[in-house]
Amino acid sequence: MKHKHILLIFGFISCLFILTGCWGKKELDELALVSAIAIDESELGYLVSVQVMVPREIASDFSDELTTVKLFSDEGESLFQTIRKLTRDLPRKSYFTHLMAIIISENIAKDNMVEILDFFLRDPEVRPDVPIFIAKDTLAQDILNVLTHIEPIPASKIKKVGLNFQTNYYGVRDTTFLNLVTSIASAGVNPAIMGLTVYGNKNEGEKNVNIQEIEAKAAIKITDFAIFKNEKLIGWLNEDESRGYSYLIGEIKNTIITIPCDKNKTQNLEITSFKNKTKLKMENGKPIINITHQINSNIAQLGCSIDKNNYQKLEKLLEKEIIKDSQHTLNVIQKKFKSDVVGFGELIHRKKPVVWKKLNQNWDDYFVNLTVNLSAEIKINRPGVVDGDVIKKILK
Amino acid sequence: MKNLRNLIKPKTKNTKEEIGKSLKNNLNNIKSILNNNSDLIIREFKISDNYSCALIIIDGLTSGDYIYDYLLKTLMIDIRTTNLLNNISTVNELFNNILDYMITLIDIKVSIYFEDILDYLLAGNSILIIDGVAKCFVIETKGFTDRGVVEATSQTVVRGPKDSFNETLRTNTMLIRRRIKDKNLCVTERKIGTITKTNIAILYIKGIAKKTIVDEVHKRLDKINIDGVLDSSYIEQLIQDHRYSVFPTIHNTERPDSAAGALLSGYVAIIVDGSPYVLIVPCLFLTLLQTSEDYYHRFHFGTFIRIIRFIAMFLTLLTPAIYIAITTFHQEMLPTPLLINISSQREGVPFPAFVEALLMEITFEILREAGVRMPRAIGSAVSIVGALVLGESAVQAGIVSAVMVIVVSITAISSLIAPTYNLGITVRLYRFFFILLAASLGMFGITIGLMILGLKLTSMKSFGVPYLYPLSPTNKEGLKDSIVRFPLWTIKKRPNLISDYNETRQEKSSKKKKKNRR
């Protein structure tokens, strides 16, 4: 009797395994792994392009010299609807967990991005740390139409170029779409994100020729930073302004600063550490913000000779250069864009919540006239691996 | 089916038949009981002219030298040179004189029951019957051939003693006695098996082993009533705690040094005649992952290799399951480049990952079984087929993916690291359970499986000792010698659930010595 029971229970349990039908099961070869998604405006509403990886082509052993990715695009009234509409063309279910880049066209960003961000936030497949970019002077779709070589997956190149730029040149605070959403949602800060563009011949980019020659016909590059006011794109910072913006937010890990010293000659300093010391003071009930750039640097390349044991002059020059750039950007964002992309509001909110309560209502207007003092503490540590003034010796 | 141990009901013994005075009758009786077996040898002879005797042996079980030098020669020739025969008047006196003065062998008994005599005879003793006496001598003249003490074959070590147990009980007890020369080492013997009458020895160190465990062993052995015991695993299966559990609750070893080590910790060893594997109880889960070699290397390596073994056990158990779970349910868990690699290999494989895994795992199990069972001469042929056809060609033919072959290889190699073969078997079986869970429920299923496994292990006991001891219940001293192995001089006490008194292993002196060494 007892054994009958055990058999019955065992039978029921094994039924459980079979009857679930392996709920949620998706075999690898039934998935279209989406590496990047680009969203453009269209007459219907949205033009959505997804870049799908072709694993067989990426894993070198199996390469048949076909393209590593395929682009599928369609138009529709909403983002999600369009993604599903892609099934007209896609033989496999699109799978977004390995998404490496979201690219949004300038027009959509100017118009309304909230709908798009809402989709990405709600969708369980999209990770919150996917880098997000704005396509400048080109369709977002065009950016996904460029083949790349060192990184065989173009989306991977986009992601890694963003990272490399951020760590070795200068960067923005809002790199991922979650950052972007957070910045939009908080009152005292507006987002700024990197722009992408295609250089060269766009039509050649999608052909294998693009990666078969040393020089690419078309290439994806990081360009200016897009400035937002709340959820809407309002303009672009040019290269110098973008750099100044990075100084203001202290988003610099390692970079090079070039100071003109003579005719066509420059002094170059490598910044090894860059920190901002931000202080909030109240004067006559008005908040005043002091930013001190604390910089450590090494000499990287000299165009003009300097005093061997005395770097003070050079330090002064660097200080002037950095403050010049920061100040310029500050003016641009205060006067031209009137958008607090640095996050001064958030700083006040954190340090003086009482004051913020008053300013919160019309912060955008107040920000335009906010007093921000900039200063810099510069330290030049090493002259590189050579000591002394090499140029002087050569010229002699 | 309720209780295997009671399968054969204890036979109530009839009153034993005693031997008679007449030699002829006795011999006829023995002959008829033994069905006139051809290996039964009866040598009738006379001590002087008055007393006829008979020496009975089973050919092959006795040592010819013993019988010639110490029995026949003394009784037939040497006795004439003494004056023993002159002084006796009755046959009983002769009997006593022979016992006292003539037989120069050490183990000699006097028996009066047929049944006992036959048991001894069949175990290799010689029986000496003298006409006119209703008693007989049972003389220990065992001398059969055995394998000798050779190197261990299944539990090998790089550093440490190389000898191993063999099939002879006496050799095995000798091997342990040689290591533990203590008066408290107790060896108690008994016979089990109504037909095989196998000798079984229970060894423990009095004063270290827990009395309750020793008693429990005896109690369980008492209950066995089976016709034959051909290997120690018979005893293992009949006295183990959780009879339906896949996990072994009795440890076995073929190494005298591990057996001696276990005895020193308070374990009880059961040696079965005819089996080179000595049983050790109680069995803890962690001891299944330990070898004696852990103690022979210095503690760094001992600890390292134990951790490796632990990892390998989990690899065996979970690698195929995790592979299936990740590739069919949780593709987001893999780094993108790895996913692309796996994905590119999976392209064109006609089966779902589950079927693929099952196919390869079963193939490997077949290969392994073939490796054990096949005649040695065709070994190379099998390895070629196994390595080339099932590995490389299957991948090239697109039947399985290369990753799957790697997964199976990792599983296979990891499963071989288990120091005791029976733990390896357990893990191999559970692996299929996990594959099934992973294929139907993904990581969720694996987690459920691990929980079931954890609950099962914590609920198990071996001879009253919790299976996961010293992990759970936790014992600080025990943990020093568990997954890690502390330096020898810090392990001062025996695990207290196994030996509850005489806990101290070493006094402070060992530590002082260490200080002096500095």
Image: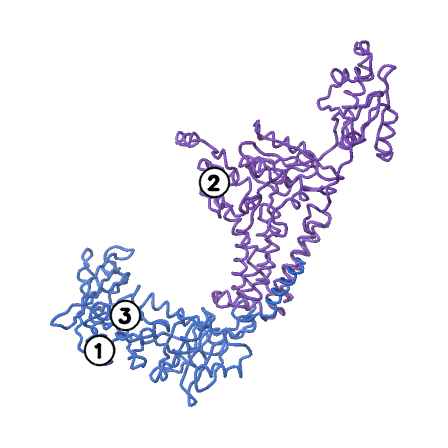
Chain colours: A blue, B purple
Q: Mark 2 lies on which chain?
A: B
Task: Residue A52: give x, y in percent of width and height.
Answer: 49, 75
The quarter of the displayed image where residue B385 is located: bottom right
State the SS at label 1: helix
Mark 3–mark 2 Cα distance, whole angstroms, equals 54 Å
In the shown orientation, is residue B190 left or right of residue A143?
Answer: right
- Labelled disc at residue B299: 2
- Determine contact: label 3, label 2, CB under 8 Å: no
Q: Nearer the viewer, residue B416 or A203?
A: B416
The quarter of the displayed image where residue B400 is located: bottom right
Callout 3 amino acid: Ser
Q: Which chain carries label 3?
A: A
Task: Residue B313: give x, y in percent of width and height.
Answer: 55, 52
In the shown orientation, is residue B491 left or right of residue A15?
Answer: left
Mark 3–mark 1 Cα distance, whole angstroms, equals 22 Å
Q: Where is A43 relative to B29, above or below?
A: below
Q: Which chain carries label 1?
A: A
In the shown orientation, is residue A229 left or right of residue B54?
Answer: left
Callout 1 amino acid: Trp
Callout 2 amino acid: Phe
Quarter of the image with the N terminus of chain A in it: bottom right
Nearer to us: label 3 or label 2:
2
The answer to whether tags 2 and 1 share a subunit is no
Task: Residue B140: give x, y in percent of width and height.
Answer: 74, 26
- Labelled disc at residue A246: 3
* Residue annotated with mark 1: A363
Task: Residue B370: give x, y in percent of width and height.
Answer: 70, 53
